[in-house]
Image: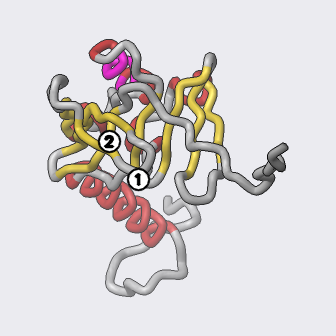
Amino acid sequence: MKALTIFKDKEPRPEKTKNPWLLETVENGLRATNIKELLDDIRPDKSIPVKYFEYDRLFGGGAFTAPLKVMEMFNELQVITPKTIGYIFAGYKYLYISDGILRRNHESGRESFFSNETLRNQSIACYLNLTYAKDETTILEAIQDTINELDNATSRHSTDTDRPRISDQNTE
């Protein structure tokens, strides 16, 4: 009779997604490549074309009034590959759950859950922590400069002594 060996410390196999998309940042936005996820490797699936999401779709057009939402992009990719249940980006695996998305870190195994409610009004840029587009950075800097100038003009404590100050009292 053979002795039974029990592997108590054996780690469970990593959960494989079906036809996942590998999301990568590129110079003009985000590139999604359909892949085959093997046990230790990720290999492109040549039968499905690469999909690009340019900055004007990720961050919104014009003054960024209509940013691409998280679920819109993921649903768009899922239409192309109906078996897709996940995405891989920057050390994280994103898996569809019935009412949201589960984000799992490859190395630590830590998980975060995002419900559809929290994702509804969140842009891809916020969700994936992408860097701002050059145009959006310029807009944010202009807004901050304006706020700083307004603060300097209305306060007595300013480093700019040559500029006229707005008086606190009515001048009649």
Q: Is label 1 in contact with label 2 (beta carbons under 8 Å)?
A: yes
Q: Which residue does the numbered mark 1 point to in the structure image? A: 90
Helix, strand or loop at label 2? It is strand
Residue 110 drawn above or below residue 151: above
Q: Which residues are magenta?
A: 73-78
Q: What amino acid is found at the position of numbered circle 1 in the picture? A: Ala
Q: Position of residue 129 (x, y in %)?
A: 43, 51
Q: Residue furthest front?
A: 1
Residue 87 visible in this rendered orientation of the protein: yes
Quarter location, residue 75:
top left
Residue 75 sits inside the magenta stretch: yes
Q: Is residue 7 magenta?
A: no
Please report the residue visible at 79 percent of the width from the left and 51 percent of the height from the top.
5
What separation in Å lies between label 1 and label 2 (alpha carbons)?
A: 8 Å
In-front residue for pair 76/68: 76
Q: Is 5 displayed left or right of 81 in the figure? A: right
Q: Tag 1: Cα neighbours inside 10 Å, few (<14), some, or many (≥20)?
A: few
Residue for badge 2: 23
In percent of width and height, residue 158 lies at 47, 81
Regarding residue 61, the answer to whether it shows in the image is: no
x, y percent for residue 88 = 41, 42
Q: Nearer the viewer, residue 120 or 86?
A: 86
In the image, what residue occupies the spot 29% across and 35% down?
A: 35
Q: Main secondary structure of the magenta part?
A: helix
Q: Secondary structure at mark 1?
A: loop
Q: Amino acid at mark 2?
A: Leu
